[in-house]
Amino acid sequence: MLATLAEALEELKEAFVPTVAKAESEDDEAEEEEEDEDDEDEDDEDEDEEGGDQMDTLRKVCAEDHHIQPYVHHYAECVERVTKAQEDPDYDQLDYKEDCVEEFFHLQHHINDCVVPRLMSKLK
């Protein structure tokens, strides 16, 4: 019975008495900072080796594809037309203001159709 009472008191003591950690010295902190800097340098090197996102690279390649060029041209014409219309001093009073949302979505749709099979083959 005395043993169980001693165990119960020990558990109570552990529950209420805070655990105290040993303070680190300045040397330990300096070593940790150097290790952190080394780790960051290694991470930077890994990112450089990867060369960026494969999907972004494929998007650029597909945007230059001859099948996609009509959509790129159509979008560029729309942007030029809208920019020219915005330069007009009466632009604020116009009832209809053209935007290039539809052309943009068509372009992105066709670029995505080009990118997906190429990306999936690289990810396998």
Image (tube, rainbow, N blue to C red):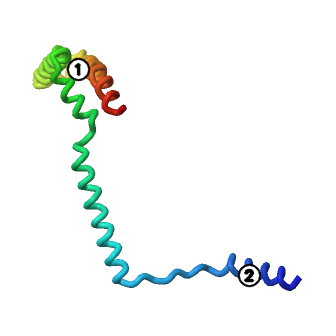
The one of 64 and 123 positioned closer to us in this rendering? 123
Residue 15: x, y in percent? 69, 76
In the image, is residue 24 above or below residue 64? below
Name the residue nearer the viewer: 91 or 35: 35
> Is residue 101 visible in the rendered structure shown here?
no
Q: Amino acid at mark 1?
A: Cys
Assign a secondary structure to mark 1. loop
Q: What residue did someone put label 2 on?
A: 10
Q: Nearer the viewer, residue 7 or 81?
A: 7
Q: Residue 116, percent across and down? A: 32, 24
Label 2: state its secondary structure.
helix
Q: Amino acid at mark 2?
A: Glu
Where does the image place residue 119, in percent across and percent down from the top left?
31, 29
> Hey, which residue is sitting farthest front in the picture?
124
Residue at the image point whose x is 34% and y is 28% from the top = 120
Indicate left or right for 28 with 20 as reference: left
Instruction: Name the residue at 42% across, 82% down.
Output: 24
Marks 2 and 1, the one that precedes in the sequence: 2
